[in-house]
Amino acid sequence: MSGARDSLGRPLRDLRISVTDRCNMRCSYCMPAEVFGLGYPFLPRDEILTFEEITRVVQVAVSLGVRKVRLTGGEPLLRRDLALLLDMLTQVEGIEDLAMTTNGLLLSPLVRRLKDAGLRRLTVSLDALDDALFRRMTGTKRPVADVLEGLAAARAAGLPVKINCVVRRGVNQTEILPLAHFCREEGYTLRFIEYMDVGNHISWDPSSVVSAREIQKIMADAFAFAPLDPLVTGEVARRYRYLDGAGEIGFITAISQPFCRDCNRARLTADGKLMTCLFATGGTDLRARLRGGSSDAGLADFLRGVWGERGDRYSELRAEAAGEQLSPKVEMSYVGG
């Protein structure tokens, strides 16, 4: 079966799957506690896709060209028996990369089983090493040491690890150099992410963004680095290598240098909606078709049609509108970033 391409000619290559809408942190740029409080109505269990349903979507997506699959949340490690899903996904022929993004709090006791089940790469969100700042930014009482323990366990299990840091002006700029030193010393790849206007309940405005160029200037006071060529089309991070050989660093520039025209990623929410953009206002319901008797061929045709109509380029349009938010958007916790 030939691959799927959208209205701008972009292929479908990357599928990011949210396995739960729940999280054990309350980061202000994703799930602010004043909105996602004790009484917040998270998805009932019967509305969340089963592992079998997720695997079926992946099989169909692979037939349309998907080669990379990433598990996200919410916090994916809150989904019980997640390793069983990995066991199932590793049986799907055609997947070249099976990864997961996590906040790392629950990682240490689980990571060996996840690796054995087929997980190939891990990304851990970590915005601060300072414990007080970490707790304040994440809304948790757990110490940052718990995340660092999970990172060490992942490394011991032999998993390549990336660390994602969202930099916000006046909040955690002071963590840029400490995180860079830490990642260099421990052998983790660091990605700095410009603060994005995902969701509807964050206090985002352009002045809160620390651009990749600003971060690079701060980094240049301590390190020498040079740009690397992209490994693949659609690569999100602008990558650099340290000139002393201590690994690489990357910058995700969705605000200052949008990369929409190479975007090849779709997102599947925990309740089975296909999102064709991180900044989507809504999604297309796949769960009804999965549970309504649709054949694999029918599901493939439907997915191809949804992707074929895709014309999303929100970040480019935002740049043209001088940084203003353009429309209400789905919450980041539903699509996993």
Image (cartoon, rainbow, N blue to C red):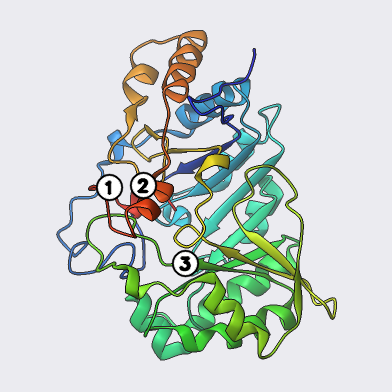
Q: Residues within 10 Å of mark 1 (few under 14, many from 20)?
A: some
Please name the residue that numbered disc 3 is placed on: 194
Secondary structure beneath dot 3 equals strand
The three-letter amino acid code for the residue at tag 2 is Phe
Earlier-in-chain disc, 3 versus 2:
3
| Circles 2 and 1: CB atoms closer than 8 Å | yes
- Tell me: 81 left or right of 35: right
Q: In which quarter of the image is the N terminus?
A: top right
Tag of residue 279:
2
For the residue pair 275 and 45, the one nearer the viewer reads as 275
Please name the residue that numbered disc 1 is placed on: 329
Q: Where is residue 211 in the image (x, y as percent from the top left)?
A: 48, 71
Residue drawn at 55 percent across, 29 percent down? 58
For the residue pair 211 and 3, the one nearer the viewer reads as 211
The three-letter amino acid code for the residue at tag 1 is Lys
Residue 55 vs 112, above or below: the answer is: above
- Tell me: 180 left or right of 157: left
Which residue occupies the extreme left position in the image? 39
Q: Quadrant of residue 217?
A: bottom right
Q: Distance between the Cα atoms at labels 2 and 1?
A: 6 Å
Secondary structure beneath dot 2 equals loop
- Tell me: 65 left or right of 321: right
| Circles 3 and 1: CB atoms closer than 8 Å | no
